[in-house]
Amino acid sequence: MNTATPCLSFIGIVDFSQEAKWLFMTESVTELLGFEPHELIGRPSLELVHPDEFPRVKQLHYDTIQQDKAAVLVYLRMRHKDPYRGYVLCGVSRTVVHNVLVGSVSFASPGKALHNASTAQEITVITPSATDFEFRRWGDPSPMPASPIPQGMNLPASPSPSTSSWGSGSGNQSPRESRSPRSRRSSSSERSRSLSVSPDRRPTSSRELQPVISFDHLSNKSFRTAMILDRFSMACPILYCSNDLLVASSDAIGRSFYDFVEKKDEEIVRDWITCVKGWGVNEKGQPSDGGFGFGKFSLLTEGRDSVPRIPEPSPMRNRHGSTSRANGRSGKYTNSHTRTSPTVPRMRLPTRSPTRDVEKFKVDAIFSAHSDGLMVILRRA
């Protein structure tokens, strides 16, 4: 293991275009790949992929979106900004979330690879030297199968290869029979094995020997929502919400994640998140990635007050009954209705009537921990 590479991870979001352009990333990208976030936002993520692995990674990007996959893992090499560091072997997790691809990029260390692969729904190894990272428990069923495809809906075949890496327009497509989630998962694994390149037969230039596909921007997929939570707070406030499909993002950002969990489920959800945080620690004891956790709970669309309101401090009075003054100056508690204790943030007032019924429904959830945040993927159960 290269000890000069931090065993960290960053959360990243890319679009559905064939370039897989970066839309968002957390700051740990700098420690892992050397780039500042502003240097990559808006640029193709695939330009960081090793040239030998580029055709397969681009095909994998297309298949992941088109087959609406969740909690899948791939091992590949990504370029470091420092040319002397070359390419870093990374584990990249991916989940399709409606109109974006959400996931994380982490340094592929053997210890973490074993745990991460054991919780992923599918593992693809593209870098030949990482074949030992393809680990699964025998007969382990998928904890969250792919979203069922409506009857009669056909998936298009892979687009025709193009001689240009970033060519526009899609090739001729033929209809493909709809398959069950289980059969699609099996065929994907078979395709991954059949496309694997053994070290002794590795081509000198994959761009020349392997065709590179070209395709138009893909359409929206499953009704999932991704949230990024503050992993360093007990309340887990929501830092980012990808869409408004399940809750209003404008209402969710800044509030505790537990506000949107029904009270009867709050204790178990807290246990799940505590467990995932425990997994998400690297060999040096630093916050990092730690595989996927799966659960089901009742989601409240408008939220509630999960943290009890703390009463505001009353004005301090001296023995004569007047408001206190410190050193001849007005005290900071002279107006208790407009100021709060400096160590306690003001809680948001309820925006709904206590007697009003709040819409709720069961959701499937995928939890994962990363160096600078927790990621939660939600969909209706």
Image: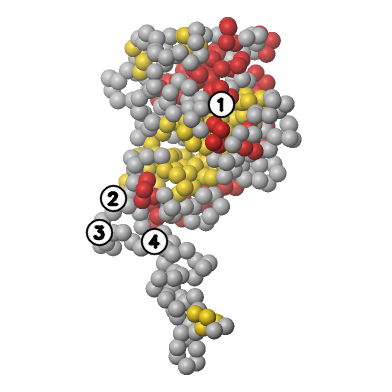
Residue 164 x/y as whole percent: 49, 10
Residue 181 x/y as whole percent: 40, 25
- Tell me the crowding category of disc 1: few under 14, some 14 to 19, or many 20 or more residues within 10 angstroms, Cα based: many
Whole-number angstrom distance, CA of label 3 to CA of label 2: 10 Å
- Lateral position of residue 114 relative to residue 103, left or right: right
Q: Which residue is pictured at 56% across the width and 17% down the height?
A: 54
Give 343 or 112, whichever is nearer the viewer. 343
- Tell me whether circle 3 and circle 1 mark residues in contact (CB < 8 Å): no
- Tell me the crowding category of disc 2: few under 14, some 14 to 19, or many 20 or more residues within 10 angstroms, Cα based: few
Ranked by sequence position, the earlier of labels 2 and 4 is: 4
Where disc 1 sits, the SS reads: strand
Where disc 2 sits, the SS reads: loop
Q: Quadrant of the N terminus?
A: top right
Disc 4 target residue: 348
The dot on residue 359 is: 2
Ranked by sequence position, the earlier of labels 3 and 1 is: 1
Where disc 4 sits, the SS reads: loop
The kind of residue tagged 3 is Arg
Kindly report which numbered mark, 2 or 4, lies closer to the viewer in this rendering.
Answer: 4
Whole-number angstrom distance, CA of label 4 to CA of label 1: 41 Å
Where disc 3 sits, the SS reads: loop
Disc 3 target residue: 356
Ranked by sequence position, the earlier of labels 2 and 1 is: 1
Residue 93 x/y as whole percent: 53, 32
The kind of residue tagged 2 is Glu
The kind of residue tagged 1 is Val
**Does 349 sit above or below residue 13?**
below
Whole-number angstrom distance, CA of label 3 to CA of label 1: 46 Å
Disc 1 target residue: 74
**Does 82 sit above or below residue 326?**
above
The dot on residue 134 is: none
The kind of residue tagged 4 is Arg
